[in-house]
Image (cartoon, coloured by chain):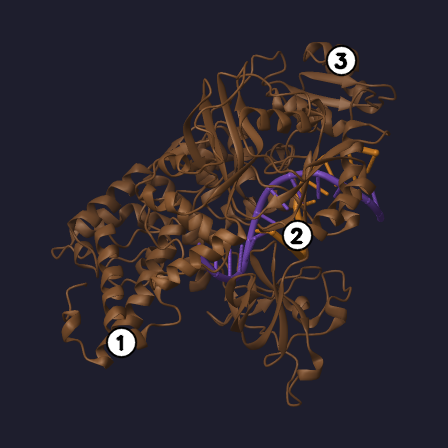
Chain colours: A brown, B purple, C orange
Amino acid sequence: MISETAVENLTLAQAREDLARLASLITDANRAYHGNDAPDLTDADFDAMKHRNAAIEARFPSLKRADSPSDQVGAAPSDGFGKIKHDVRMLSLENAFDAADITDFDDRVRKFLGLSSAVSYTAEPKIDGLSLSLRYVNGRLTQPATRGDGETGENVTDNARTIADIPQRLQGDNIPALMDIRGEVYMSHADFAALNARNAAKADKTFANPRNAAAGSLRQLDASITASRPLRFFAYAWGALSDPLAKTQSGAIARLHDLGFQTNPLTTLCNGPDAMLAQYRAIEAQRATLGYDIDGVVYKVDDLALQSRLGFRSSTPRWAIAHKFPAELAWTRLESIDIQVGRTGALSPVARLKPVTVGGVVVSNATLHNEDYIQGRDSRGNPIRQGRDIRVGDWVQVYRAGDVIPKIADVDLAQRPATSTPYQFPDLCPDCGSPAIREPGDAVRRCTGGLICPAQAVERLKHFVARGAFDIEGLGAKQIEAFFNDSDLPIKTPADIFTLAARDTAQPLRKLKNRDGWGEKSVTNLVAAIEDKRQIPLNRLIFALGIRHVGDSSASLLANHYTSWATFEAAMTAAEIGSGPEWRDLTAIDGVGDVLAASLVTAFHHPAERAAIDALAAQLSVQDAVQNAPSDSPVAGKTLVFTGTLEKMSRAEAKSRAEALGAKVAGSVSAKTDLVIAGPGAGSKAKAAEALGVAIIDEDAWLALIGAT
DNA sequence: GTGCCTCGAGTTCC
DNA sequence: CTCGAGGCAC
């Protein structure tokens, strides 16, 4: 696909056409790469396309497109970086946007800990860069990794070694044998401006903002290029440590500084929310003169013992929060409203905007959530945007929520065309024409077509191959779309994926390798990737089915409860909604309520859906769930029930501690309960425990049991 | 019944 | 990342 007319022989018109084609191909390939989708192209093909694009641009500078791929950040494919699994996950932070969010945060912290006195927090600027985890073994830098998805990052060793702020070797005594030090790589305003000026002079690509410049520089495959880019680093956190750094967050930061790291000089200690908010205002006032980008202030509970008691929610720590500065805003025109159909049939309106730059990024789409949101109301009927509705043709104010998702903040009624009419939300599915119904009390309107609706079917398949589900390499969203519409070798249901190779072999013509852009090699790879997933853990299979209300976490609950596919499938088949032993067993799972249970049972009783599930299961070898008892704690694997008032810690804390030790915390006492921890005022649960002969201990005995003081 | 806390679902741009 | 809503504690 790259062998075309030599660049020097191109006519102007051909060149223009070629640039447009290359721009789209390269953009798609970049997207596929970064989205972990199908790698449609080999690196060699990708490089060839970029070279051709650059060559044509060099010969016809006037034709260079506004969206030229040579200007795209992060366009370099970076196959050269190895993957590194973080020992301790790199989490994100909960966000706060106003003073009330901060006082709420402080209230939650104190409530969780059962403290009425003030808590001390560190406050530091939130650097707008990219986070990096640096591993030091015996004081020597061994392995710097990017954040990645939090679980697994990329090894950027050579690049990180070129950053002056990152010590190769730590200073001082008593350096822990193993340390993962975390912080932010960033570029100063001055260095960013100089880099762009230098690049512009060389007709090289310029960067939209310092963050992109830092990210692009760190991801260079050639470390000498990274070395020529002036990157900096602030240390502010840590992962795995063989010895603690200090007893407090502020002490640990001071220690990091002593070890030779740069730490942010604006880090201060605040006693309670008033001091935190004062520091927020102080940092905001200095924002313009700092010389580097920050996007808010981060507060962390100072006492590390309290941090560890607070622990983590599924993806954020309870002991920290990011107080974000107000988002950047931009006005543009709303050109049209499109409706997308999701895998559950949800009709989601999307605003198509006249492209506008917001916070250094060109935005052309924005989410409109649902019908009410367009009309200017939230789900409770309260006005948003002072109740102003959104119409096609309006001037709208766009921002990027959390600096990512474009949303519409406001509408300029003075600019509204006199002819405009309120947006009419469709009541038929735009894809299959089935009625789209809004259940009472529901915010979304859903297509009732089910598997009949092609949009729903495709979205379900995309979910099936997504990360967390089957995660089949080389079979991403784009390939799913293509196979769904393929007349020779269609994939219409999950089972079709696993019969693909056999169907291909059965054909005399072997269509697979003759698909556009496909060859022997890509076929072998795809077939191998599919075979690789024929063995699948039970929880992944349950999640992949795409049953409404069954996400990642509920799928694991179900897998751990039923252990095997045979047991699970039999229980779902036998269950009746609202009654019977299977229903009671299902809804007794902590975290499974009536709605989720009904959704599961309905799916297994629906003839077409059931047929698809059976056909799929027949293709697979499902791995039983392994009960993991990670700790040797006496409560590991036990089911506990707390009742009455706990005096030394809150209920939430007791639950999270017990779970960290491998115990399951249930809400009510049953024959499966191993132990009841009863505080003063325990009533019916303690009685039930006595009746069932379940062991009962008091809070002090419980604390002794888990070795807490 | 009310008020948290989490999870699920949908979305954008790199 | 955000919103809605499910699930559970009080």
C-alpha span from label 3 to label 1 = 78 Å
Dot 1 alpha-carbon crowd within 10 angstroms: few under 14, some 14 to 19, many 20 or more: few
Disc 2 residue type (three-letter): Arg
Q: Is residue A182 visible?
A: yes
Dot 1 amino acid type: Glu
The quadrant of the picture occupied by the C terminus of chain A is top right
Gap in Å between the C-alphas at discs 1 and 2? 45 Å
Q: Is residue A469 left or right of residue A406?
A: left
Left or right of A339 on screen, residue A216: left
Q: Which mark is residue A696?
A: 3
How many marks on residues? Answer: 3
- The earlier-in-sequence mark between 3 and 1 is 1
Q: Which mark is residue A17?
A: 1
Question: Pointer 3 and pointer 1: residues touching (CB < 8 Å)?
Answer: no
Snapshot quadrant of residue A458: bottom left
Calculate the distance from the C-alpha at mark 2 to the C-alpha at mark 3. Answer: 57 Å
Number of the label disc, if any, that sits on residue A458: none
Which residue corresponds to the image point at 58% horizontal and 25% vertical from the top-left?
A: A258
Q: Is residue A612 visible?
A: no
Amino acid type, residue under disc 3 in the picture: Ile
Which type of secondary structure does the marked residue at label 1 adopt?
helix
Residue A287 marker: 2
- Say which of marks 2 and 3 sits in front: 2
User: In the image, is residue A201 above or below residue A280?
Assistant: below
Name the one closer to the observer, A393 or A571. A393
A393 or A647: nearer the viewer: A393
Q: Position of residue B10 (x, y in %)?
A: 54, 58
| Residue drawn at 43 percent across, 59 percent down | A196
Quadrant of the image occupied by residue A350: bottom right
Residue at disc 2, secondary structure? helix
Which element is circle 3 on? strand
